[in-house]
Amino acid sequence: MPELPEVESIARSLRRKIVGLRIAGIDCLWPKLLRGNPEELAALAGQTVVSVGRRGKHLLLECGDRVLVFHLKMTGRFLWSRPGKPRGRHVRLVVRFDGPSRELQFEDVRKFGFVRSVAAVELAACPELRPLGPEPFGIPADAFAARLRMRRGRIKSVLLDQAFVAGIGNIYADEMLFEAGIHPLMTASRLSRTRADRLWTAMRDVLGRAVAAGGSTIRDYRNADGEIGSFQDDHHVYGKGGQACPRCGSPVRRAVMGGRSSHYCARCQRR
Protein backbone atom coordinates (compact mmCIF):
# COMPACT_ATOMS: atom_id res chain seq x y z
CA MET A 1 0.00 0.00 0.00
CA PRO A 2 1.43 3.42 -0.91
CA GLU A 3 2.47 5.29 2.22
CA LEU A 4 3.10 8.99 2.81
CA PRO A 5 6.20 9.32 0.55
CA GLU A 6 4.53 7.54 -2.37
CA VAL A 7 1.29 9.52 -2.13
CA GLU A 8 3.28 12.76 -1.82
CA SER A 9 5.24 11.84 -4.94
CA ILE A 10 2.01 11.14 -6.83
CA ALA A 11 0.57 14.47 -5.67
CA ARG A 12 3.63 16.36 -6.89
CA SER A 13 3.60 14.66 -10.28
CA LEU A 14 -0.13 15.34 -10.73
CA ARG A 15 0.19 18.94 -9.59
CA ARG A 16 2.35 19.74 -12.62
CA LYS A 17 -0.20 18.25 -14.98
CA ILE A 18 -3.73 19.08 -13.90
CA VAL A 19 -3.75 22.24 -11.76
CA GLY A 20 -5.60 24.88 -13.76
CA LEU A 21 -7.42 22.40 -16.00
CA ARG A 22 -11.22 22.48 -16.25
CA ILE A 23 -13.08 19.22 -15.68
CA ALA A 24 -15.38 18.21 -18.53
CA GLY A 25 -16.76 15.19 -16.70
CA ILE A 26 -15.98 12.16 -14.57
CA ASP A 27 -16.73 8.58 -15.60
CA CYS A 28 -16.98 6.11 -12.72
CA LEU A 29 -16.50 2.69 -14.33
CA TRP A 30 -16.62 0.75 -11.06
CA PRO A 31 -19.58 1.99 -8.96
CA LYS A 32 -18.24 0.40 -5.76
CA LEU A 33 -15.21 2.71 -5.99
CA LEU A 34 -17.41 5.66 -5.05
CA ARG A 35 -18.28 6.47 -1.47
CA GLY A 36 -21.22 8.82 -1.43
CA ASN A 37 -23.78 9.98 -3.96
CA PRO A 38 -22.97 9.67 -7.71
CA GLU A 39 -24.49 13.12 -8.18
CA GLU A 40 -21.60 14.54 -6.16
CA LEU A 41 -19.21 13.43 -8.92
CA ALA A 42 -21.44 14.87 -11.63
CA ALA A 43 -21.35 18.22 -9.80
CA LEU A 44 -17.62 18.49 -10.54
CA ALA A 45 -18.20 19.06 -14.26
CA GLY A 46 -17.13 22.61 -15.08
CA GLN A 47 -14.97 22.95 -11.98
CA THR A 48 -11.27 23.84 -12.25
CA VAL A 49 -8.55 21.89 -10.45
CA VAL A 50 -7.17 24.35 -7.89
CA SER A 51 -4.65 22.17 -6.07
CA VAL A 52 -3.45 18.62 -5.53
CA GLY A 53 -2.52 17.72 -1.98
CA ARG A 54 -2.25 14.93 0.55
CA ARG A 55 -3.57 14.07 3.99
CA GLY A 56 -1.99 10.98 5.49
CA LYS A 57 -2.20 8.33 2.77
CA HIS A 58 -5.11 10.11 1.03
CA LEU A 59 -4.72 12.11 -2.17
CA LEU A 60 -6.78 15.30 -2.38
CA LEU A 61 -7.87 16.99 -5.62
CA GLU A 62 -9.38 20.39 -4.83
CA CYS A 63 -11.76 21.33 -7.64
CA GLY A 64 -13.50 24.65 -7.07
CA ASP A 65 -15.75 24.27 -4.05
CA ARG A 66 -15.36 20.48 -3.85
CA VAL A 67 -12.54 18.05 -3.09
CA LEU A 68 -12.01 14.55 -4.47
CA VAL A 69 -10.57 12.32 -1.73
CA PHE A 70 -8.78 9.23 -3.07
CA HIS A 71 -7.27 6.30 -1.21
CA LEU A 72 -5.11 4.01 -3.33
CA LYS A 73 -5.19 1.05 -0.91
CA MET A 74 -3.12 -1.89 -2.25
CA THR A 75 -2.95 -1.39 -6.02
CA GLY A 76 -4.45 2.00 -6.90
CA ARG A 77 -2.49 4.30 -9.19
CA PHE A 78 -3.01 7.21 -11.57
CA LEU A 79 -2.36 7.18 -15.31
CA TRP A 80 -2.05 10.26 -17.50
CA SER A 81 -3.43 9.06 -20.83
CA ARG A 82 -4.45 10.45 -24.20
CA PRO A 83 -8.22 10.68 -24.85
CA GLY A 84 -9.34 8.04 -27.32
CA LYS A 85 -6.56 5.65 -26.41
CA PRO A 86 -7.99 2.25 -25.33
CA ARG A 87 -8.38 2.12 -21.57
CA GLY A 88 -6.93 -0.75 -19.59
CA ARG A 89 -9.34 -3.25 -18.11
CA HIS A 90 -8.42 -2.22 -14.56
CA VAL A 91 -9.26 1.48 -15.02
CA ARG A 92 -12.04 2.28 -12.51
CA LEU A 93 -12.50 6.04 -12.91
CA VAL A 94 -11.64 8.65 -15.53
CA VAL A 95 -11.45 12.42 -15.10
CA ARG A 96 -11.89 14.14 -18.47
CA PHE A 97 -10.71 17.71 -19.05
CA ASP A 98 -11.73 20.40 -21.52
CA GLY A 99 -9.59 20.88 -24.60
CA PRO A 100 -6.99 18.56 -26.11
CA SER A 101 -5.27 17.68 -22.84
CA ARG A 102 -4.97 14.11 -21.64
CA GLU A 103 -7.34 12.40 -19.24
CA LEU A 104 -6.61 11.23 -15.71
CA GLN A 105 -7.34 7.57 -15.11
CA PHE A 106 -7.51 5.80 -11.77
CA GLU A 107 -6.48 2.18 -12.11
CA ASP A 108 -6.97 -0.39 -9.35
CA VAL A 109 -6.34 -4.08 -10.02
CA ARG A 110 -7.67 -5.37 -6.68
CA LYS A 111 -10.55 -2.88 -6.37
CA PHE A 112 -9.78 -1.89 -2.78
CA GLY A 113 -9.32 1.83 -3.44
CA PHE A 114 -12.04 4.44 -3.11
CA VAL A 115 -12.96 8.03 -3.94
CA ARG A 116 -15.29 10.44 -2.20
CA SER A 117 -16.41 13.90 -3.31
CA VAL A 118 -16.92 16.35 -0.43
CA ALA A 119 -17.58 20.05 -0.13
CA ALA A 120 -14.32 21.89 0.51
CA VAL A 121 -15.77 23.59 3.60
CA GLU A 122 -16.61 20.15 5.05
CA LEU A 123 -13.29 18.47 4.26
CA ALA A 124 -12.11 18.20 7.87
CA ALA A 125 -15.36 16.38 8.74
CA CYS A 126 -14.95 13.82 5.95
CA PRO A 127 -15.41 10.34 7.51
CA GLU A 128 -12.07 9.13 6.14
CA LEU A 129 -10.06 12.19 7.23
CA ARG A 130 -11.68 13.11 10.55
CA PRO A 131 -10.02 10.28 12.59
CA LEU A 132 -6.50 10.98 11.30
CA GLY A 133 -3.78 12.12 13.66
CA PRO A 134 -1.29 14.93 12.96
CA GLU A 135 1.08 14.88 10.02
CA PRO A 136 4.63 13.62 10.77
CA PHE A 137 6.19 16.87 9.55
CA GLY A 138 3.71 19.02 11.46
CA ILE A 139 3.87 17.60 14.98
CA PRO A 140 6.45 19.14 17.38
CA ALA A 141 8.76 16.88 19.37
CA ASP A 142 7.04 17.73 22.67
CA ALA A 143 3.60 16.82 21.32
CA PHE A 144 4.96 13.62 19.76
CA ALA A 145 6.48 12.51 23.09
CA ALA A 146 3.26 13.40 24.92
CA ARG A 147 1.19 11.27 22.54
CA LEU A 148 3.57 8.34 23.02
CA ARG A 149 3.18 8.54 26.82
CA MET A 150 -0.55 7.96 26.41
CA ARG A 151 -0.14 4.78 24.35
CA ARG A 152 0.33 1.41 26.02
CA GLY A 153 0.58 -0.59 22.80
CA ARG A 154 3.72 -1.84 21.09
CA ILE A 155 5.55 0.99 19.39
CA LYS A 156 5.37 -0.61 15.93
CA SER A 157 1.59 -0.94 16.19
CA VAL A 158 1.29 2.62 17.50
CA LEU A 159 3.21 4.00 14.52
CA LEU A 160 0.88 2.14 12.15
CA ASP A 161 -2.20 3.59 13.84
CA GLN A 162 -3.32 6.45 11.58
CA ALA A 163 -5.03 8.13 14.54
CA PHE A 164 -1.63 8.51 16.21
CA VAL A 165 0.27 10.02 13.28
CA ALA A 166 -1.06 9.97 9.73
CA GLY A 167 0.75 8.45 6.76
CA ILE A 168 3.15 5.90 8.25
CA GLY A 169 2.95 2.29 7.06
CA ASN A 170 4.92 -0.90 7.46
CA ILE A 171 7.95 0.07 5.38
CA TYR A 172 8.74 3.36 7.07
CA ALA A 173 7.83 2.21 10.59
CA ASP A 174 10.52 -0.49 10.30
CA GLU A 175 13.06 1.95 8.89
CA MET A 176 12.52 4.71 11.45
CA LEU A 177 12.59 2.27 14.39
CA PHE A 178 15.90 0.92 13.13
CA GLU A 179 17.32 4.40 12.73
CA ALA A 180 16.21 5.29 16.26
CA GLY A 181 17.51 2.01 17.72
CA ILE A 182 14.12 1.00 19.14
CA HIS A 183 12.78 -2.56 19.23
CA PRO A 184 9.33 -2.81 17.55
CA LEU A 185 7.85 -4.66 20.55
CA MET A 186 8.69 -1.97 23.09
CA THR A 187 5.71 -0.39 24.85
CA ALA A 188 5.22 3.12 23.51
CA SER A 189 4.44 4.72 26.87
CA ARG A 190 7.66 3.32 28.39
CA LEU A 191 9.97 5.04 25.95
CA SER A 192 12.23 7.58 27.63
CA ARG A 193 12.11 11.17 26.42
CA THR A 194 15.54 10.65 24.85
CA ARG A 195 14.28 7.69 22.85
CA ALA A 196 11.06 9.49 21.95
CA ASP A 197 13.11 12.39 20.59
CA ARG A 198 15.31 9.99 18.62
CA LEU A 199 12.22 8.42 17.09
CA TRP A 200 10.73 11.83 16.23
CA THR A 201 13.97 12.79 14.49
CA ALA A 202 14.18 9.42 12.69
CA MET A 203 10.56 9.73 11.55
CA ARG A 204 11.18 13.08 9.89
CA ASP A 205 14.54 12.03 8.48
CA VAL A 206 13.37 8.73 6.96
CA LEU A 207 10.18 10.19 5.50
CA GLY A 208 12.01 13.26 4.21
CA ARG A 209 14.61 11.16 2.40
CA ALA A 210 11.91 8.86 1.04
CA VAL A 211 9.90 11.78 -0.34
CA ALA A 212 13.04 13.16 -2.00
CA ALA A 213 13.64 9.72 -3.58
CA GLY A 214 10.10 9.52 -4.93
CA GLY A 215 9.08 6.79 -2.48
CA SER A 216 9.79 3.06 -2.50
CA THR A 217 8.85 0.79 -5.38
CA ILE A 218 8.48 -2.68 -3.87
CA ARG A 219 6.06 -4.11 -6.44
CA ASP A 220 4.21 -1.99 -8.98
CA TYR A 221 4.16 1.54 -7.52
CA ARG A 222 4.58 4.37 -10.05
CA ASN A 223 3.87 8.07 -9.81
CA ALA A 224 1.65 9.82 -12.38
CA ASP A 225 4.68 10.21 -14.69
CA GLY A 226 5.14 6.45 -14.69
CA GLU A 227 8.36 6.78 -12.70
CA ILE A 228 9.35 4.37 -9.94
CA GLY A 229 10.69 5.43 -6.57
CA SER A 230 14.28 4.72 -5.53
CA PHE A 231 14.19 4.72 -1.73
CA GLN A 232 14.01 0.92 -1.68
CA ASP A 233 17.72 1.06 -2.48
CA ASP A 234 18.25 2.74 0.91
CA HIS A 235 16.19 0.36 3.04
CA HIS A 236 18.26 -0.89 5.96
CA VAL A 237 15.96 -3.56 7.40
CA TYR A 238 12.61 -3.66 5.61
CA GLY A 239 12.49 -6.77 3.43
CA LYS A 240 16.03 -7.70 4.53
CA GLY A 241 15.21 -10.68 6.74
CA GLY A 242 18.26 -12.95 7.07
CA GLN A 243 20.64 -10.40 5.56
CA ALA A 244 23.42 -8.68 7.49
CA CYS A 245 22.54 -5.57 9.46
CA PRO A 246 24.34 -2.61 7.81
CA ARG A 247 25.51 -1.39 11.23
CA CYS A 248 26.65 -4.47 13.15
CA GLY A 249 26.53 -7.36 10.70
CA SER A 250 24.04 -9.42 12.72
CA PRO A 251 21.23 -11.08 10.74
CA VAL A 252 18.16 -8.89 10.29
CA ARG A 253 15.20 -10.65 11.88
CA ARG A 254 11.69 -10.93 10.49
CA ALA A 255 8.74 -11.48 12.81
CA VAL A 256 4.97 -11.26 12.44
CA MET A 257 3.49 -8.78 14.90
CA GLY A 258 -0.21 -8.07 14.90
CA GLY A 259 -0.58 -9.73 11.52
CA ARG A 260 2.12 -7.54 9.93
CA SER A 261 5.72 -8.44 9.19
CA SER A 262 8.39 -6.51 11.05
CA HIS A 263 12.09 -6.36 10.26
CA TYR A 264 14.66 -5.33 12.85
CA CYS A 265 18.16 -5.97 14.21
CA ALA A 266 18.02 -7.54 17.66
CA ARG A 267 21.49 -6.19 18.49
CA CYS A 268 20.99 -2.58 17.34
CA GLN A 269 17.38 -2.46 18.56
CA ARG A 270 17.53 -4.03 21.99
CA ARG A 271 14.24 -4.53 23.75
Image (tube, rainbow, N blue to C red):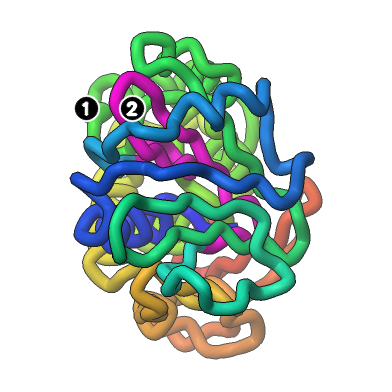
In the image shown, does 54 or 144 lie closer to the viewer?
54
Amino acid type, label 2: Phe
Q: Residue at x 41, y 78 (%)?
A: 226
Q: Mark 1 packing: few (<14 Cα in 10 Å), some, or many (20+)? A: few
Is residue 121 shown to the viewer in this render?
yes
129 within the magenta span: no
68 within the magenta span: yes
The residue tagged 1 is 140
| Disc 2 element | helix
Q: Residue at x 33, y 19 (%)?
A: 65
Q: Main secondary structure of the magenta part?
A: strand
241 is higher (above) or lower (below) than 140: below
What residue is shown at x 55% (from left), y 31% (from top)?
A: 41
Mark 2: few, some, or many residues within 10 Å (few <14, many ≥20)? Answer: some
How far apart marks 2 and 1 lie (CA) works out to 6 Å
* Residue identifier under label 2: 144
Q: Pinpoint residue 24: horizontal percent, then vertical percent.
A: 41, 44
Q: Residue at x 34, y 26 (%)?
A: 145
Q: Vertically, is 54 above or below 221?
A: above
Q: Which residues are magenta?
A: 54-77
Q: Is 125 rendered above or below residue 161?
A: above
Is 163 situated above or below 46?
above
Name the one closer to the observer, 168 or 73.
73
Percent position (x, y) of residue 185?
A: 63, 47
